[in-house]
Amino acid sequence: MSEACDRCTRRSWLVGRLSGHLDQIRGNRPAIRGVLALSDEKLIAALSGREKGIITAEWSRLDASATRRVWRSASTLAICRHNACFPLALAQLPDPPAVIHVFGQLERFEQLISDSPTIALVGARRASADGLALARELGRTLSVCGVSVISGMALGIDSAAHEGALAADARTIAVLACGPERAYPARRRQLHAELAQRAVVVSELPPGTAPYRWAFPARNRIIAALAQMVVVVEAADRSGSLITAEIAADLGRVVGAVPGDPGSWHSAGTNALLRDGAHLIRDARDILDDAFGVESAGGAGAPREPLPLALSLSDDQRAVIAAVDAGFTTAASVAEYCGSAAEVVGPLTELELLGVLERRRDGSYLRL
């Protein structure tokens, strides 16, 4: 069985033990990264304060085998940077996590990291309806195309990206800022359970660790490192997703952003990224082209056809899709295109449930 070595086990335990102390510098991201790069002894000296003697004694006497048994009792597996399964991209960080705790199947984690391209989809917690719909569409389409979608399971864009991937081939990894067996936020408990069963949930923090504020920017470096490209779907001016984009740029990753209304706070962060040189993202095709260097057929001025569907559809459903693609976006106009209203009501509803079409507030249909 793959598991962490004694040295890395002690380090992971120590970071979890000092989480409350680390929260003293939660607002200073460079300081968090600098502290995480310290040796165990220096980490204790820098953070433990009056508890230095107690924590030093606990650390020096730690039974690594017993600690790993406790972790396994929480249905998690621990792989350290000395393990062949450990992602090379994480080991190359200046402040690498000693251990990645996996909640779910380790084989699935290896498959999603080593056998697939990886894209991070991140964004605002208080996202707009359009932003959530786009995040789900991107997650679903990238998963269908064999890309692993990485995000942080936060409310809003992150959760929507995971939901989209789960609606397809479940090629997604959730990176948490607490123990991986812990559903955070709690209201996404069902999503957390489905991710653990069909995909994978990971964290550098050991099981049982509560979420602290310092852990969120620290978690973002893992998301950025694991991804070949980071795409920000929506973000306010001071959104945490901009931290992920900044770390990704520092690591030499491609950064993309979805443009938005200049007057909307939902788009302030993404528009600023575009101003500063991020790749403009309109749909999954842009992500695939920018991340993997594939030019769209016909060049920049060519019409952009929708990506092919990896679904078994009936002739009626395909006729309805053809109508929407041709610009007939209301039920009445689709019926006129297809021949009769009786032939389109069922397929329209089915395609909406499949996530192929979205019915907007004005009653029109949008191809996803």
Image (cartoon, rainbow, N blue to C red):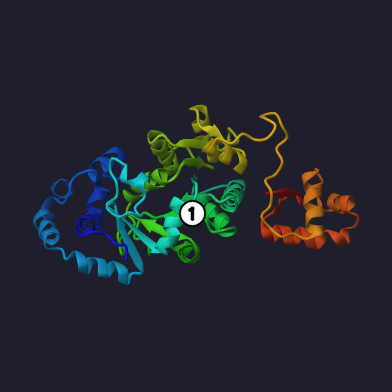
Q: Which residue is mark 1?
A: 155
User: Which residue lies at the image location 29% right of the left edge and 38% below the top edge?
Assistant: 30
Q: Locate residue 158, reporting x and y percent.
A: 49, 51
Asked which secondary structure carries label 1, the reply is loop
Indicate left or right for 221 with 126 as reference.
Answer: left
Is 84 drawn above or below residue 36 in the view shown?
A: below
Q: Locate residue 256, reporting x and y percent.
A: 52, 36
Indicate left or right for 162 with 182 as reference.
Answer: right
Residue 35, picture quadrant: top left
Amino acid type at mark 1: Leu
Callout 1 crowding tier (Cα within 10 Å): few <14, some 14–19, many ≥20: some
Q: Quadrant of the N terminus?
A: bottom left
User: Which residue lies at the image location 86% right of the left edge and 60% below the top edge?
Assistant: 343
Q: Locate residue 45, reporting x and y percent.
A: 13, 47
Front residue (pair 263, 252)? 252
Front residue (pair 153, 1)? 1
